[in-house]
Amino acid sequence: MRSAAIPPQGESQPLSWFLIEVAKKLGLKEYFEKLDLEYAWWDRMLKKAGLYPKVTARKLIEEGPYVEGHPVDYNLLFKPIATRSGRFEIYSNELAEECYYNHKSRWQSNQHVYPLPTSIPIAEPKNEDEFYLITGKATWHQKSATQHNRYLMEDAIEGGCSYTSIYINTKRAKKLGIKDGDLVEVECVGPTKKDDPCVHQETAIGIKQKGRVKVTEALHPETAWIYFAGGHVAKLMLSKARRGITHNWLLPISVTPYSAATCKSYSIVKIRKIAEGE
Amino acid sequence: MASYAMVIDLNRCVRSRTCYVACKKEHRILAHPRDENHPYEYYRLRYAEWEWGEYPMVKRAFIPLICMHCEDPICLKFCPLDAISKKSDGIIVIDKERCNGCGICAHVCPYGALYITPEGKADGCDFCVDRLDAGLPPKCVEECPSDKRGAIIFGDLDDPENQVSNLIDSGKARPLLLAGVKSVRVYYVPSPNEGDWDKLATDESFLNALAKRKVDLPDITGVL
């Protein structure tokens, strides 16, 4: 629990203050007036844990940790999860009884709620110039939070491990006639709805971006790799942070059919060398 | 009088570039010019990063490089104005009053550890000599985020109990001796990422990484 060590400095305010102010502007003041937002969130979690009101957030902050003694008469490693059996289920009785085999359910016989997990393979690159586009974080950046540190974005650092380049396996690059430092066009070509039923939106298909190549042996030949959070579009970001390729633009949206959560975060791109200034 | 040395433990280095930022901030070294075509780089500390091997058995090596404070410095020999000197504690310092920024020292340094400031003066790591005088460790040592001990260790070689002495005497810390250099005051604890440390000085990938600087030093044709 992140309780304040010192009062907010200057004009800074806790998140709850902003939420309440926004609520007031929205005309929802009555719902927030008596709410102690600093603690309400934690109290809700304590309620779920079955500890509230014996343990409250305020008590924790004022009195310190709450310790509850338990005789060790259960399996210490067993942590029940929110399934009927409390365990990880491969065959879901809930889905079977309430959805797939339930004639009253609108999900009856729907393939997306089949009680056994359904394996939907990912699409594959089809041509020689197609790659899976993957991303990773830089050891020296905290996502985009540190991209305004000019020292961290300098060439001396970018030299060995360029932050704004697109990385391709040496042998694949050679086949395509691409060398270190070449300018390339990266076009999203998949996965489409046809290739992968999980794809929900294809707006990324056909999007093109430009970037400089860095060839490396340290990359799977089927993949092209970029740093996460590169290719910013915000005008006030350092120009170096705005170079490079934005992963999100090249990512068709795929969702799990049942829960609508993001399921497969992958993209297939076509890479071709282009002339300087093209 | 102390005899200073530094050990960089490459097994502990997490490549956060904190030492780079800390060094530039401490010494108010300018960020590189905004103009991408501008040829100069300003640093007291830089990195050599290279890879070796073939997929999938590939290693990526990463070495922070600073002035090695050579026992017999080449830069000192070549400085036409005697602006470079070696203090009794082993630290190499540059007299900014004398230096005219001719760039010879930066050219001859095999480690590429020196640069020319925008004011036209040679500059390089002096182990944060002002901080040492104030009883503080070099800034990079203080700021290194790796583990509790940090990846950069600094100390007095005359103190046998010092961690630096122990690492060097035990052979765990090794010097990086390039051509023409016999003894230095900056040591490394090698990690498996660099391959054979003894062959590093002649390793082509490493030497390429070492030479990869965009620094356009002043023309010294005919000076040497």
Image (cartoon, coloured by chain):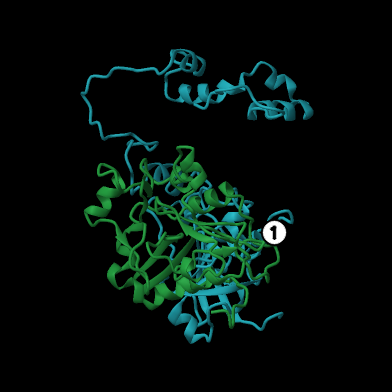
Chain colours: A cyan, B green
Residue depicted at 52% across the width and 15% down the height: A58
Q: Is residue B181 left or right of residue A276?
A: left
Residue depicted at 23% across the width and 19% down the height: A71
Nearest to the observer: residue B150 or residue A166:
B150
Q: Is residue B38 visible?
A: yes
Q: Is residue A131 above or below residue A275?
A: above
Q: Is residue B141 above or below residue A38?
A: below
Q: Is residue B217 above or below residue A67?
A: below
Q: Is residue A261 visible?
A: no
Give the total of numbered labels.
1
Residue depicted at 50% across the width and 79% down the height: A126
* Percent x, y of residue B216: 61, 73
Q: Residues within 10 Å of mark 1 (few under 14, many from 20)?
A: few
Mark 1 secondary-structure assignment: loop
Which quadrant would the N terminus of chain B be assigned to in this image?
Answer: top left
Occupied quadrant, residue B177: bottom left
As shown in the figure, which amino acid type bears the numbered disc 1?
Val
* Percent x, y of residue A270: 57, 76
Disc 1 target residue: A233
Nearest to the observer: residue B54 or residue B165:
B165
The chain holding disc 1 is: A
Occupied quadrant, residue A158: bottom right
* Percent x, y of residue A184: 61, 77
* Percent x, y of residue B15: 44, 55
Nearest to the observer: residue B120 or residue A2:
B120
